[in-house]
Amino acid sequence: MYHKISNQLCQCGTPFYCYDLSLLRSTLGAINLEIEGYPFVVHYALKANANPVILREIVNAGVGADLVSGNEIMAAIEAGFDPNKMAYAGVGKTDWEIETGIDKDIYCFNVESVPEMEVINEIAARKGKTMGIAIRVNPNIDAHTHRYITTGTNEDKFGIDIPMLDEVVEKAMNLSNIHLRGLHFHIGSQITSLEPYKMLCEKVNKLVDHYEKNGVNFEMIDVGGGLGIDYEKPEENPIAPFHDFFAVFKNGLKLREGQKVHFELGRSIVAQCGALISRVVFVKENSVKKFVILDAGMTDLLRPALYDAHHKIVNLTSQESDMETYDVVGPICESSDVFACDEQLPITRRGDLIAILSAGAYGESMASSYNMRNLPGSQFVG
Ligand code: LLP
């Protein structure tokens, strides 16, 4: 995609995010192909990227929305997502956010605690409505990903433990302004092995059997998101392994008549279509290292500083065939403002354009104005 980035595109000033909309469309097409004919509903997790142009493409593909704040509900409505395909998760929904979800008639609140369930019931009653909910279950599965993005073990704040679930399900059945639609799970993010998802299917089957025996039938099961992408070889694997991912659920879940499976994919939809484009401000040398200093920093793309994530870096300008080893860093006054250590790049000079790839997910959406910097802009190709 970065081959499509011209100097003209850069006239608006660096750093900015460049999105390849044709890759985004192909990704959405690949998902729709896999789910066709199955009772599967895919939601897009807006937290990965809520750029309105990106959202418009996703709406056009018929995908639903997975939301984590009142402002995300409003952004999803604005972008044209169908409220009937909106799920709203989060451990700390405020009253205003709950009211917004109720006023917009969203399909489902993914409820994470009993107090939250009671407040939804109370506000819905006040508004004369009955709201769909799913109970977020903590399945205690370790997704073997970074500790900051593991969500499904008992050590995490998310969801309701299985030993407490009977009580919570019973409570949900007895609240008059709540309609229990099903169970919700999400075990983590950037998951690159399918094993945790197979384990999840087993847990889901057991729970669905258990509740069926007790007279509780679920219209849906939400298995969350988390499918990982290839950060090291994005050009070779621009589209996530959707075939294998959906096959796990096609083969692993024992669905009941009419039961639907919901998915909440974020990263795997948008990561590869975005690159952060920046310019080299200086190349600096000390007694042990050479540094490429960019005009983009951790305020534009936080993932390397926060998770030690590595994104592939490409010099778009240099025609040199000789390679050199550099630390690629940003201008922010923080030692963690480093994109990569000991990165091999062709000889790099002041003014060169640099692309940091696979940055479409959790890039622009996590940008901040620390050091009073401007937020990065966006450009579109394809
Ligand atoms: N559903 C729930 C309940 C979630 O918490 C998340 C992500 C998703 C779906 C979407 O997960 P995905 O398919 O994108 O993995 N900032 C981190 C990732 C945080 C993920 C938070 N939850 C990063 O840059 O790696």
Image (cartoon, rainbow, N blue to C red):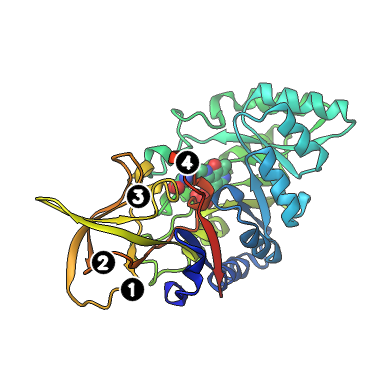
Quarter that holds the C terminus: bottom right
Q: Indicate the secondary structure of the residue bearing disc 2.
A: loop
Confirm or reject: label 3 Cβ below 8 Å from ligand 1: yes
Label 2 neighbour load within 10 Å: few <14, some 14-19, many 20+: some
**Viewer-closest of 158 and 196:** 158
From the image, tell me which residue sits under label 4.
372
**Viewer-closest of 127 and 11:** 11
Residue depicted at x 71% and y 42%: 218
Label 4 neighbour load within 10 Å: few <14, some 14-19, many 20+: few
Nearer the N terminus, badge 2 or badge 3?
Answer: 3
From the image, tell me which residue sits under label 1.
317
Nearer the N terminus, badge 1 or badge 3?
Answer: 3
The Cα–Cα distance between marks 2 and 4, rounded to whole angstroms, is 27 Å
The Cα–Cα distance between marks 1 and 2, rounded to whole angstroms, is 9 Å
| Figure check: 54 above or below 166 | below
Residue depicted at x 32% and y 61%: 280
- Give the residue at the far right of this rendering: 128
From the image, tell me which residue sits under label 3.
309
From the image, tell me which residue sits under label 2.
349
The Cα–Cα distance between marks 1 and 3, rounded to whole angstroms, is 24 Å
- Give the residue at the far left of this rendering: 287
